[in-house]
Amino acid sequence: MAEGDIALRVDGATCYFDVSPSWLTRVVERSPKRTLRAVDGVSFEVPRGKTLSVVGESGCGKSTLARMVVGLQVPTAGTLAFTPIDKPDGTSVPPRLQMIFQDPYASLNPRWRVGDIVSEPIRELGLMEGETAIQDRIGELLGIVGLSPSDASRYPHEFSGGQRQRISIARALATEADFLVCDEPTSALDVSVQAQILNLMRRLQAEFGLTYLFISHNLSVVRHMSDQIAIMYLGRFVEVGPAEQVFSDPRHPYTRLLLETIPNVENPIRDRRPMSGEVPSPIAPPPGCPFHPRCPMAEARCQVERPLLRGDARLTACHLV
């Protein structure tokens, strides 16, 4: 893929946290340092104008990866590079980045009116001059996300969860962002409202050419949003590929586990044997393949040798694939 077609290139991104007790406690108890491996060397590319979804259970490192991409978390190792955007006049500018947070109830200032929330990035970045132009832009942004320009005078507590998330999206669009990192933007919403927000995000992507890094724990949510899907487990990618191929032909046992959690009314699998076991601690991950304690197909090799992410269009980290 050409350099200009890549919006974000991540190479060996790693983020470790020191969760050790105090030095004195370690000396008295003769205990070693404890390191939490939140993100453990992931590499990927996000094509411009497309959606890459990172899917996994809670605690697998998805949100930490999202925070690293937007600069809220400093990586321990690895590189994250955004490709500049070529303008018609021949110059190149860095892409504008914005994040849509998970909780629409906590990510909006309750003391600010909606108009102030949406206009803050416009004023701080100096995108427009003149109060009349800014107010017109606020009304335009609220209209784009399905709200009324008159809602600018209201406070966040006067809106439902779905409407608050629309305000968050309007605030992100106010920066004229090209790349949006969406950290489970629908997980706190009802199912019907989730569909509305996802449809809105797809429409905005088609209209403005936005690039999404979409974080979720629910494969059914991202199925119709994603061009590429990366399955994450204990800080590592275990399967990466085109969305439809991952759904129609899952290769990694963990991907199959996630897909089995999606209810199927037409073809319920009542006699299936669910995989047992808890997610291991990222402080003391198991040796070899991190999924082998829960995998029904694990072999002796899986307990000692870490599988590498291999393949062409489909990447899988499994000795049996």
Image (cartoon, rainbow, N blue to C red):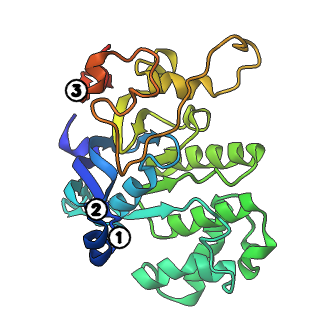
Task: Say which element carries label 3.
Answer: loop
Of helix, strand and loop, which one carries label 2? loop
Nearest to the observer: residue 1 or residue 57? 57
Residue depicted at x 52% and y 47%: 58
- Residue assigned mark 1: 21
Amino acid residing under circle 3: Glu
Which of these two is toward me, 41 or 155? 41
Horizontal and vertical percent position of residue 69: 34, 58
The local crowd at label 1, few if under 14, some if 14 to 19, many if 20 or more residues have their Cα within 10 Å, is: few
Mark 3, residue position:
305
Q: CA distance from mark 1 to mark 2?
A: 9 Å
The reply to whether dot 1 and dot 2 touch (C-beta < 8 Å) is yes
Please tell me which residue is depicted at 30% across the width and 22% down the height of the picture: 302
Tag 2 near tag 3, CB within 8 Å: no
Locate residue 235 relative to residue 183 in the image: left or right: left
* Badge number at residue 31: 2
Q: CA distance from mark 3 to mark 1?
A: 30 Å
Q: Position of residue 175 (x, y in %)?
A: 46, 70
Count of marks overlaid on the render: 3
